[in-house]
Image: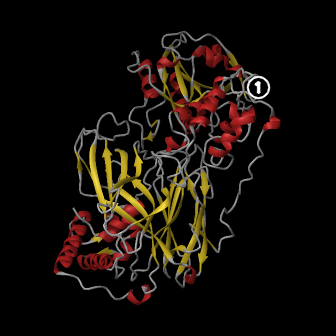
Amino acid sequence: MKISTYNRQLRYYLTFFASCAIAAAFNLSVMHAEDSGSPLGRTVAAFSLSDYRGREFSLDDFSSQKLMAVAFLGTECPLAKLYGPRLNALADEFASKGVAFVGINSNTHDSNSEIAAYVQRHAIEFPLLKDLGNRVADAMGAQRTPEVFLLDQDRVVRYWGRIDDQYGVGYSRDEPTRHDLRLAIEELLSGLSVSQPITEAVGCHIGRIKTPDETAVVTYSNQVARIFQRQCVECHRPGEIAPFSLTNYDEVVGWADTISEVIEEQRMPPWHAKGPPGHFKNERLMTDDEKQTIYDWVASGAPQGDPKQLPEPIEYVTGWRLSREPDAIIAMRDHPFVVPAEGTVEYQYFIVDPGFTEDKWIRGAEVLPGNRSVVHHAIVFFRTPDEMSHQGLGSLTGYVPGQSSFELPSHQARFVPAGSKFVFQMHYTPTGAPEEDLTRVGLLFSDAADVTEELVTLVAINHDFEIPAHAQDFPIQATRSNFPPGAKLQGITPHMHVRGRSFRVDAINSTATNPSHTLLDVPRYDFNWQHAYALTEPLPLTSGLRLECTALFDNSEKNLVNPDPSVTVRWGDQTWEEMMIAFLEVSIPVDRDRDDRRNEPPPLTDQQRASAEQTAADLIKRFDRDGDGVLRNAETPKAFATFAFGRIDKNRDKTITYEEALEASLRSVQDKANGNGS
């Protein structure tokens, strides 16, 4: 079913960053039973530990309880933060049934004050004990946080693993599909054996005591600290979104095993494009030598070395990072948004009037999150006045961890017409406690006379596809060959949903000496990281050149994030549906006659008018749930309702008629014919 190009442009861009999974940003790891041998069926030896206040608890204190859940937790591990309140709720629910919960912190780098703060922040009511020297963790074979051992009354391990299956490496679900710990408790209380006694625990390595080799050549002070400054500390420092800091040895040493693991598995630093170094100017690549240095350091016990060899600390800018103070600062609204402690937070959309009474050329922009610990990403774009046509998608700037600003050369800028509104699309990730955020965007303006190139966002797209059930490598292609005169490709952002497996963009020019070359190859697409790949050398989009995009989709059972491999998948906004888009950042020569042509649409052919009529009819048919022939705001998807509805509803009666849809569709056809289509 077709919808108008105009409406599609809005929804394509707004779903660009849809539902990035929390697990990828949190460097999670998986515990396998074979890692240390299964503790299932073992009797846990008696132990005594103290909590952060010095109060001592022993295993015998819980001898009257039918079951005992021992949960290993860390204060900085993101999943330990998210699951703390969930464990607390389970403890409260099952307390009257003879089930005790005890938390154990075995991390060498977590102090009593940090444990106290964790307990207070997440309202933990069960005891949380400090395991000095990892004695209990070693005895029980614990590897990760959070990781749970469920003991019967004889203190024999009957269940070992995760709390539920909501989170995994590289994915998260909106809700768990299996509540493993709850089910194990209920089965044992009913006198049954645990149906699934071992599961994979997802979380961070327990920070164990290490015995450093002081004779090692590779030390933190001499080599490793420099690598972390180049590759990690931008996000792994106080106030940023990364879950722990890597700014000094005491912070780093407890995470040594986790760091080695995520580097080896190519999960950190986050970068998914294949190709030689230097092809993209914003690439995040760790060299083979840097990786080996990290591996050697961890293998030798993570020695500190001589602190005199440490590099000078980097002085990070805490405010605006633009080359000068912003010419204008726009907040997403006049009061903070409250992010709940846990759960899935739907995308939030905030519309604000920047008060532009004249056209603006924006050379630089930076998104400044009010609370970096919860802002996973933020997208700011502009919505032009109703009567205004505009080339491209109206994108302005965005924020993802480690990337928050753009500043163009003096001859380039984005054009924002007078009367435009700004739209903030906010994606929040809960941290286990309520948080507040008030994000702002800062702008740098250019004089119109100085700008010779306009930056716009175009798309190559395919929305007419059906991915068969159980298909493992299903190809979908999209081609873009019509570009404005003088256009140059500056960057590419591929977008699919959770079934997306790989994405490649090739430049094809049959008249050239080398008719084909690959611009972007993402062999392992990760929906959690929506990378924008900025070309080091812009590509002239000359006549005869076309961009061919090829994506592979995995709708099989082997895709762990596949919502349902038994269904045929079609185009749609939701993550359980699919998209196939390449967003193209393109610079074009400035159109000095823009104002003269604003109200001079080209005449339409009979074929174009017929297409517009069909598109308008399809739009009404697609979303008209009650069948009354008009669309109401509540009947349309959230992104459409927020950004497109008001522009089509010309008489402001809160409904869209066929005539209004046709007018919008005709405008879209006219824009495309006038070179303004995306």
Q: Position of residue 57 (x, y in %)?
A: 69, 20
Q: How many marks?
A: 1
Left or right: 33 as drawn, with respect to 301: left
Occupied quadrant, residue 311: top right
Q: Is residue 28 above or below residue 130?
A: below
Left or right: 501 as drawn, with respect to 320: left
Q: Position of residue 512 (x, y in %)?
A: 33, 61
Occupied quadrant, residue 486: bottom left
Q: Is residue 550 above or below residue 648?
A: above
Where does the N terminus fall, quadrant-wise? bottom left
Q: What residue is at 40 percent from the left and 81 percent from the top?
A: 388
Query: What amino acid type is highlighted by mark number 1?
Result: Gly
Q: Is residue 552 above or below residue 136?
A: below
Residue situated in front as seen by the camera: 13 or 295 = 295
Number of residues whose C-alpha sits closer than 10 Å to that of mark 1, classed few (under 14), some (14–19) or many (20 or more): few
Q: Position of residue 131 (x, y in %)?
A: 68, 22
Residue situated in front as seen by the camera: 86 or 264 = 264
Q: Is residue 511 above or below residue 341?
A: below
Can the viewer see residue 578?
A: no
Left or right: 417 as drawn, with respect to 331: left
Can the viewer see residue 101?
A: yes
Q: What residue is at 62 percent from the left and 35 percent from the top?
A: 124
Identify residue for label 1: 54
Q: Position of residue 48 (x, y in %)?
A: 69, 16
